[in-house]
Amino acid sequence: MSLPVLSRPLADPPTGALPPIPSNKPPRKSLPQITSRLKAPSRTTTLSPPPVASTVDLSYPKPSERASGISPGKSVRKTVSIGSFPQPPNAASRPPTSASAASTTSTRKRTSDGTGSTVQPSTIKSKKSPKASLAASFMTSQTPSLLNSTGDGMTISTKAANRISDAQSSIHSLPQSRSSSANGSYSTSATTIEEVDDDSRGRTKDLDDTTMDSKQISKGKEIKGNVIVSVRVRPDPGTQNNYQSEEGEWMVDGRRGLVACRGKDGGDYHYDNVFTTYDDNAKVYDASAKRLVRRVMEGYHGTVFAYGMTGTGKTFSMQGTMSSPGVIPLAITDIFSYIRETPHREFLLRVSYLEIYNEKIHDLLAVPVGGGVGGGQQEEIKLREDNKRGVYATPLKEEIVQSPTQLLRVIHRGDTARRTGSTQFNSRSSRSHAVVQIVVESRERIPGAGAMHENGKRVAMFPGGVRVSTLSLIDLAGSERAADDKERRAEGAHINKSLLTLGTVIARLSGNRDKNGNPTDKDGKHLPYRDSKLTRLLQPALSGNSLVSILCTIQIGAGLTVAGNNHTAETLNTLKFAARAKNNIVSHAKKATEEVGSGVNAGLLERYRTEIQTLRAQLEGQQKSADEKEERQIEREAEQRHEEQMLEMQLARTALKERIEHLNRLILCSKSTGVNGGSVSALGMHSRLSGGTEYAGSRSVRSSASQSTLGVSSGLRRYPSGASLGGARSNSGHLSFATIPDEDEEGGDDYGDGRATLQAQVRALQADLQDKTRYISTLEKRLLQARRSSHSRVSMAFNKSPGEDGDICRKLEEKDAIISDLQRTVAALRSAVRKRDMAELTPEMSSSEFKHNRAQEGHQSSGSNGSSQMSHSSTPAGSAGPRSPLATSPLALLSPQKAMDKKRKTVDEMSKMLDEMIQDKVESGQLIKGRSPSLRLPSRRSSLQRHSRRTSSVGTGGPAMNSLVASLRERDSTIEPGEGV
Ligand SMILES: Nc1ncnc2c1ncn2[C@@H]1O[C@H](COP(=O)(O)OP(=O)(O)OP(=O)(O)O)[C@@H](O)[C@H]1O
């Protein structure tokens, strides 16, 4: 099936003055009592049919005779032209459009045979009278391609055919579609909202003033102008438009809107429009639907439907052909023209297409479950009704369209799915009622624009509100006599039943309502809308919520008789239906209100806008949270780095602090206790000497170790021997040598003068022990940390580039150096202890020697300086050289003076105990062996043993001390040099 190519202007809106109100038809002598109420179309047109149609001699033998109970004159009680529709905005109030401009620059004059010839614009412009303008509107119709109007330049392949439905097309459906399920349905019931529309009413009044006595105008009569009834006569090729049939003579007068039948049951029938066989689809559309379409764009609901016997041209009129597009494609063109002309509003169009076949509703746009158009199972579509939306079909697929081509494609897709069949009168007869529904949503582009001017009148508009209106284009199935084919008969029965119901409803329409607001007939009985799906669906339109245009198609002439059927009765039935519709349908159509907010009635436009806003807000929120997350991550990383740095600094500070404390304590010890010499003072000296500016690392460890070593050395001086002195020298290095003379000198003074009490010394030693303990634990910590970090770096290094191996190796070597230092320090400690023990156990030290030395010591101390003493005392025993204080001091301890011996012995014991404790600490703290340092906890047993030894020796004095020394000896003999303690 091919889509029709529009052969008329893209935009041919009624921008100029509206056509004149049809003047009252001249009273006819034969119908004096009727003609006073009739308004015959008095359109002056240059396209009048040939004389054969209009000059048929009409003779009305029985003018007052009623056809089927309805007098033709009475049935057409009031005929109001299309001009009674609400007026469109003034041309001046709208921005000029290219389409309208085009219509003034180049026009084509349509002739009665459908061909056009170019005429000059001036020819048309010169016709200023309303009548002339209407004529001009027909004359100026241009016939550009519909495809060009979209601007997309797409070519739709078509196959020439007389009917649009006869052609095949390869156009595919568009992806953008949505379903109007119960939840997703959209209101088209805005017209149920009553609003005062002074504009349209006033205009109707003005228009009617020209045609009828103002006293006769009532509101009910005014709104009848919202219903247009037209009759179109199909050409009968067989009879060359000879309107004579066996049943009588027919007269069709397009100018007067008259169809008359002279014969049995005949009569005169007047309508808003009567289209002769010479009128083409464009003229039909212009006169019957164009203005309605425009009103729909302005916010009114509109319904156009074609009614008539089968084969009389309903589908031809609604769809048209490629060369002569029908109402639907022309309406689509006008819809988009209106959108282009109205830049201050934004629009959203959605379309649905359904058919009622055998009293079931089918969605022509939904792909059936079983696949294939028209086949498979479809979800049953039901009609529902609510106060807001009125009657609606659900679930019905709706597609959003953005161009005329797109819209035509969608409708074409529905057409191909529509049921057709061959009947006696139509090889491709529509077997269903087809309903195209175009929902138009619109809103002001600038929210808050406030009041707008329409037709020169100030119309209050709610800024930002969405207006929803609906255009229903319905091609009804044709009524027919019983067919031979069973299927056709069944279809025909349903078609006829629904059309009968439609006729019944229209015949009983009265405009009355019961107390619940339901429409009733004159007798107050309910109208049978529910008797058929068609009437149920048309209920909103028939009960007055919509502008209505009914196009009734007939075929008259001898051709029908030739075919063996006389359809005059059917034709008369159609004419009567049209007359009843015109008389009975009362339309209260009002412009839909603008719904503000995102409720059901607000339409998709508002929903989409709300959704856009929501999504935009979500997007911003997500962006914000992502940024925040990133910031937090960065902060966290920075915090971690900071913490690591702080930890490192803390460790460094702790080490520094401890060192400072240690140094301070040593200094304070000597000051606060008044001790100027002895081991305490010596330790302080050594600390100062060895400390310097070294805070941590191997140097600190070394200095600390030196202190320990020196501490031990200070004890050893009480038990001097040549071997011990040599060992002490070799292990302690230059520090030992540098400090020994001071220590010895001061120590000699201490004990010699007895200024420092033993208690003070013990305290000082204990404090020193605590310092050492703390220092050792700090070293442990650092060692552990260094090991951990080097491990983690090594593991990281494995994952990193091989180029970093050198760094790691270097660091490992550094750590190893530290460990080696520590090991050396411990070894020095051990060595010092061993030497001390050896010195302690020297038996051959004679008392005379001791005396001699002691005397010498006393002599030297009374006069000479420390350095000379040192040079003498550092000489080994028995030699002529100077003797070391370490050599002389232990001898002095073995003095025969008992009191002094006792005192010194106690000090020695204490010193040994302290040494042992230091040793224990070192032993229990960190044990380093080779390159794999590990912590070793002291065994509980040995610890306890040590503790008991300590307490016993402290509590009991000499014997305990002996056993302590023995155990020390025993232990030390098991330790090999170089082995970790
Ligand atoms: N005004 C017209 N001018 C030229 N051809 C016409 C006209 N009206 C109808 N026809 C032709 O008559 C045939 C039948 O028309 P159409 O199918 O439109 O009738 P119908 O009323 O829709 O029939 P049905 O109810 O069976 O579907 C078609 O071939 C169509 O081209």
Image: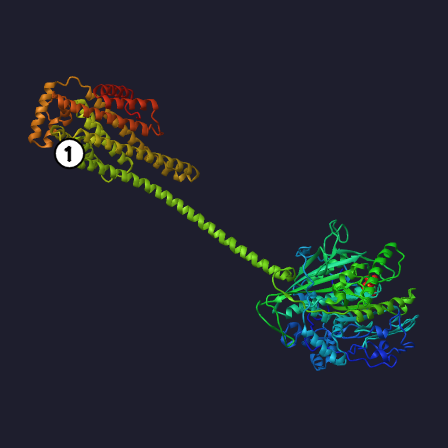
Up-down relation of residue 674 to residue 547 (above or below): above
Q: How many marks?
A: 1
* Residue 5 visible in the snapshot: no
User: Residue furthest toward the front?
Assistant: 515
Residue 188 can be seen in this image: yes
Placement of the N terminus among the 4 image quadrants: bottom right
Q: Is residue 949 left or right of residue 286?
A: left
Residue 97 drawn above or below residue 940:
below
Q: Which quadrant does ligand 1 occupy?
A: bottom right
| Of the pair 746 and 243, the residue shown nearer to us | 746
> Which residue is nearer to you in this view: 782 or 950?
950
Going 26% across and 25% down the picture, which residue do you hit? 916
Give the left or right position of residue 901, taking residue 9 as reference.
Answer: left
Position in image of residue 871 (x %, y %) = 11, 29
Residue at 74%, 50% in the rendered image = 371
Q: Position of residue 691 (x, y in %)?
A: 23, 37
Where is residue 690, by image quadrant? top left
Q: Describe the element under mark 1 as helix, strand or loop.
A: loop
Q: Toward the viewer: 600 or 291?
A: 600
Q: Residue 166, relative to residue 76: is it above or below? A: above
Q: Amino acid at mark 1?
A: Asn
Residue 90 position within the rendered picture, expressed as x and y whole percent measured from the top left = 66, 76
Residue where numbered disc 1 is placed: 676
Q: Position of residue 765 (x, y in %)?
A: 22, 30
Cβ at disc 1 under 8 Å from ligand 1: no
Quarter placement of the C terminus: top left
Question: Image check: 388 left or right of 804?
Answer: right
